[in-house]
Amino acid sequence: QDSRTMKKIVRVDDNIVAAFAGLTADARVLINQARVQAQSYRLTFEDAPSVEYVAKWIAQLQQKYTQMGGVRPYGVTSLIAGFDQDGTPNLFQTDPSGVLSAWKA
């Protein structure tokens, strides 16, 4: 893949990755904010964030922008996957409306 292009599968944290479809610029903003939130979680609780926590945080942010007046909603659907501390695999899907769905991984 060309190094100048945006990758569609990115690492959010040590144990969490995200894949997205939609507007690449919106995805880049969401992923960067999710990375900052994961770092903030690590500093606050001295533990890695769970996959569910990051997925809920992304979905909540997408839902907030859907409901807010004067701003455009995020045009991104994402899959957030990873392993929790006990090794359990998790897979979540978020929609631009902020709907969060859990899937068996």
Image (tube, rainbow, N blue to C red):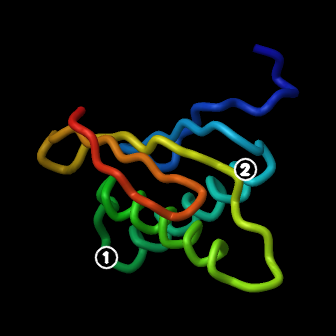
Q: Quadrant of the C terminus?
A: top left
Which amino acid, by three-letter code, is at mark 2?
Arg
8 in relation to 99, above or below: above
SS for callout 1:
helix
Quickly name the residue at label 2.
28
> Image check: 88 left or right of 18?
left
- The type of residue carrying mark 1 is Phe
The image quadrant that residue 61 belongs to is bottom right
The image shows residue 77 at horizontal and vertical percentages of 58, 46
Residue tagged by mark 1?
A: 45
Is residue 43 found left or right of 63 in the rendered image? left
Residue 47 occupies quadrant: bottom left
The image position of residue 35, as x and y in percent, is 56, 58
Local crowd at mark 2 within 10 Å, few (<14), some, or many (≥20)? Answer: some
As helix, strand or loop, the secondary structure at mark 2 comes to: helix
**Residue displayed at 82% across by 23% down:** 3
Closest to the observer, 43 or 99: 99
Outermost residue toward the left? 86
* Residue 70 in picture, x, y percent from top left: 82, 83
Whole-percent x, y for residue 71 in the image: 80, 77
